[in-house]
Amino acid sequence: MERDITVAQYLKLRLEQQGLQHMFGVAGNYTAPLLDTILADECSPLRHIESNANELCAGYAADAYGRLKGFAAVYVTYSVGAFSILNAIAGSFVERVPVLLINGAPTNKEDSIEKHTGLLYSHTTGYQFVDINMFRPVTVAAERITNARQATYQIDSVITAMLTEHRPGYLEVCEDVWRAPCRAPVEPLKSGRDDICTVSSVDDAVTATMKRLVAAKQAIVWAGIELQRFGLQDTFARLMDVLNKTLASSEQPIRFVTSAWSKSVLSERNQYFEGCYTLTKEEIDTLIGTDGVLLGVGANTIGKDTGNQNIRGDRTVLACDNSLFIGAGFYPGVDLKSFMVKLIQALEQQAASRHLMDLRIQQAEPVQFATVQAMGDGSVQLGYDSFFGALGEWLTQEEVLVVDAGFSLIAAQSVRIPAQNGFVAQAAWLSIGYSVAAATGVKCACPDNRAVVVVGDGAFQETCQAVSDHHAHGQNTVVFVLANGIYGIEQKLVNPNPFRKGSHKQEYPDPLLNSVYDYNDLPAWRYSKLVDVVGGTGKRVGNLDELTSVLHEIRKNPNENYVVEVPLNKLDLPSAVASGIDSAVGEDEIDHPGWPPANIF
């Protein structure tokens, strides 16, 4: 006979079965019955209910936790909380992170009264089902639970869809349902991905890939984000070993590259790692020439990774998103794990093939930091390149680097990350402020590691409250705020002219085009003083010597959380941006009379 439990207990058990140990959110009365149920069980592995500064911070923390642990959950209250977390859940959807959003809703009685009498309760808009309709486009499954009889099926369907697609799910639970009885779970849930694999398509895809490799003169492998999302990093390492055993007599090994989205899917100390690249068509030319092949394994094409170019063509083999693309050829129903396993088998069977042994990769030039500017006292002025150069020398396998969108993310690509999964960034959705709050989830997922955040001042002002979460939860997180006083990346996109130097800088008749726009200026904060309010240790560094000293201090204090203010020149640029700034075309420059100037191209 089935044992009755409550809906809250049912959901709690399902979360525990996914290995969940932490939940994130902002408390509200509509979710209180679930939280009370979890707290009442002292033996539950789901021991930690993290209270966050706000819903956006909770969403970012859950996203980072889900990236590293494979599943996450976050709780909010109806509308006022749900509206605030929408941005974070949308980012999780785009970047394929399975975050379960649990939204507590008004009771069935309150919903009925509102419908029939027009009474507007707190946290409601009067528009029926606004919350679930808002989240349906950014979740793989969304359910509104109004009775206990159906609750178990709805919970199971959402979690199963999440496990299958590695995307967020949404549960909207009326408050009076939480304590209602339902049947207990029968068996654990599992991904349905194996059920959608088309065996013949996988075989055809492997055959086509082998044919393309045999015909190529040069090759490089692009390690994509799906390797980390689907837990296939060890399989990929095996694939690289087999590729290189097959090519044992080659003068150079076949190497792999990553992109901003997939940085650190394997340790960047791996013997086959080549570097982190923006894979534009020009960069691909450098890597494999005109007769080579780029084998993307779990690598989705997004603007940040490809310089907003469509790189698919005869030289690309891209296995991702349950399919394989080879030029104009398309193979649907190709499960990534099945493809990789069968490709390894095919390579092993043809290890003696002379065609494969002729594959080569052109050695790319290593990324160099720009020459730093010497100050009068002999110390080194800090800029993006000198800062990241020092940070890269300091990082070990014990740190996870969390970097925000903007110039920080661009500059961080040249930093070698020692640890697998040692780099976290929102490289596709690119919501500024993600990193500071995400660090909370990173530390929960990796308690033995230290989260190290690098964030611009504009992004920091979005979610600086998360430093309070770091301190309150006893986390030893370090936040470096690169303070240049402006939204630099936005200025560069719209009008890069202020960043140009010498004869390349234009003197436009319209003075607005000659300096940073007022709306890109930021309020001046003393960032290192924030800890006086929320807790932690604050530092401010003005040159490389001071930064080095603070890095040593941080290392000697492994239990402290820090905020380190790093003032930068307003017009400083990472070398990766500076190298193309003179020929960059700003959106406001295109239609300006006299564009383009003769000395731009």
Image (tube, rainbow, N blue to C red):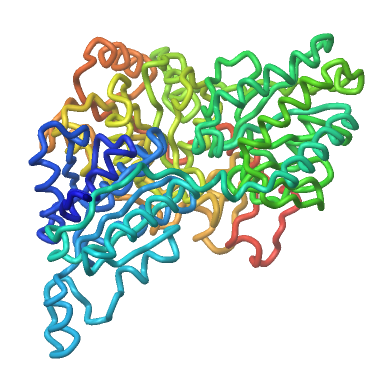
Residue 500 lies, in percent from the top left, at: 59, 43
Where 375 sits versus 335, above or below?
above
* Residue located 61% across and 31% down the image: 258
Where 472 sits versus 114, above or below?
above
**In the figure, is residue 367 to the left or right of 541?**
right
**In the figure, is residue 125 to the left or right of 484?**
left
* Residue located 39% across and 48% down the image: 432
Outermost bottom residue: 117
Outermost front residue: 1
* Residue located 65% across and 67% down the image: 591
> Do we see residue 474 in this rendering?
yes
> Where on the picture, by quarter, is residue 225?
top right
> Where on the picture, by quarter, is residue 124?
bottom left
Residue 494 lies, in percent from the top left, at: 54, 57
**In the figure, is residue 287 to the left or right of 400?**
right
Which residue is more in the foreground, 320 or 591?
320
* Residue located 42% across and 12% down the image: 378
Count of all numbered marks drawn on residues in the image = 0
Residue 366 lies, in percent from the top left, at: 66, 21
Which residue is more in the foreground, 15 or 379?
15
> Do we see residue 260 in this rendering?
no
Where 146 sits versus 54, above or below?
below
Which residue is more in the foreground, 317 or 530?
317
**In the figure, is residue 366 to the left or right of 566?**
right
Residue 361 lies, in percent from the top left, at: 79, 23
> Where on the picture, by quarter, is residue 138?
bottom left
